[in-house]
Image (cartoon, rainbow, N blue to C red):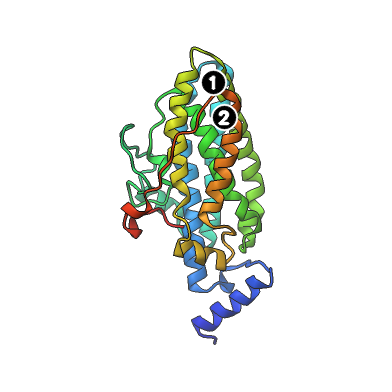
Amino acid sequence: MPTENEKHERLLEKIRAGKTVESPEEMSQEYRTHLINLMQMQADSELSGGFGYVPWIVKAPTVPEMLAVATIVKDEVRHARVMYRLLADLGINPEEKIRETDLTLRVSGDQDLGTMRAARDKRVNIFYYPIETWADFVMFNFCMDRGAGHQLLDVYECSYGPWRRVIDGIFKEEKMHIAHGETWIKRLAGDAATHEECQQALNKWYIRTMNIFGRPKSPKNAIYRALRLKLRDNDEVRSAFADEVRGIVGPLGLTLPAWKPKWEELPQEAVIPG
């Protein structure tokens, strides 16, 4: 019977050879712990995001938009279901986790969490903020779904085979959400009556999205990359997101707000993992 260290070294050799991990039996405890952490973050974020969108089914400005929002909610809950099924394969009880966690929790709209979480669940902290206006909904679509898309790109080449195989369907639907947000910011920014509201929403949600990627050169991210659960440093992903957003909003007469990282102000355990 191999020791845990031997099992982990054997796993690393497999990962370095470009092969995928397909079953819990192949995993070292370290690999399993980090994999569960990342997949739990995605699952909790997908479900919490869907809950945050629900009120906007009836608040949307037109009946076609009510249908669009309802479709996005359905997509997010389905994504969560897919991810919780993967977690169940690793011995996690999704229903028990959900019962233990208030994924509907939202902080007050003027509260600034920076990079901290407001509770013990694993959702990305942007999902603690309420969506208070239609411009908020649009900009959340535009910024956060785009930011999540940049993060999910790494999963296409990650070392856990079952996760790789489900991500394509999830990402296709996320791209539809991103396109919905982009269509609407063009409408809001292009109308003199709503241009400033659009700018204010960008100021709010761009900063919050920039905070989701984690600190540069984080030790945990280095472990994720060694296990090929992520491929890029946090700052590389953030920069790709920022460059893309800048290229879209500039021609619309919108200006990106200055973003100042708070890494040095916070203790390591307060920062979003990875």
Whether 44 is drawn above or below 111: the answer is below
Viewer-proximal residue, 118 or 92? 118
Whether 187 is drawn above or below 152: the answer is above
Could you say whether the residue bearing mark 2 is in a helix, strand or loop? helix
- Left or right: 95 in relation to 173: left
- Left or right: 162 in relation to 80: right
Q: Residues within 10 Å of mark 1 (few under 14, many from 20)?
A: some
**Rendering coords of residue 98 (x, y %):** 41, 48
Q: Residues within 10 Å of mark 2 (few under 14, many from 20)?
A: some
Whether 195 is drawn above or below 89: the answer is above
Which part of the image, by quadrant, shows the N terminus?
Answer: bottom right
| For the residues bearing labels 1 and 2, Cβ distance under 8 angstroms | yes
Residue furthest out toward the top: 193
Which residue position holds label 2? Answer: 249
**Rendering coords of residue 199 (x, y %):** 47, 25
Q: Residue at x 61, y 34 (%)?
A: 247
Numbered mark located on residue 57 in the image: none
**Rendering coords of residue 145 (x, y %):** 54, 39
Which amino acid, by three-letter code, is at mark 2?
Val
Q: Residue at x 63, y 77 (%)?
A: 13
Viewer-proximal residue, 150 or 105? 150
Which amino acid, by three-letter code, is at mark 1?
Ala
Could you say whether the residue bearing mark 1 is in a helix, strand or loop? helix
Which residue position holds label 1? Answer: 189
Residue furthest out toward the bottom: 1
Viewer-proximal residue, 94 or 229? 229
Q: Residue at x 56, y 43 (%)?
A: 241
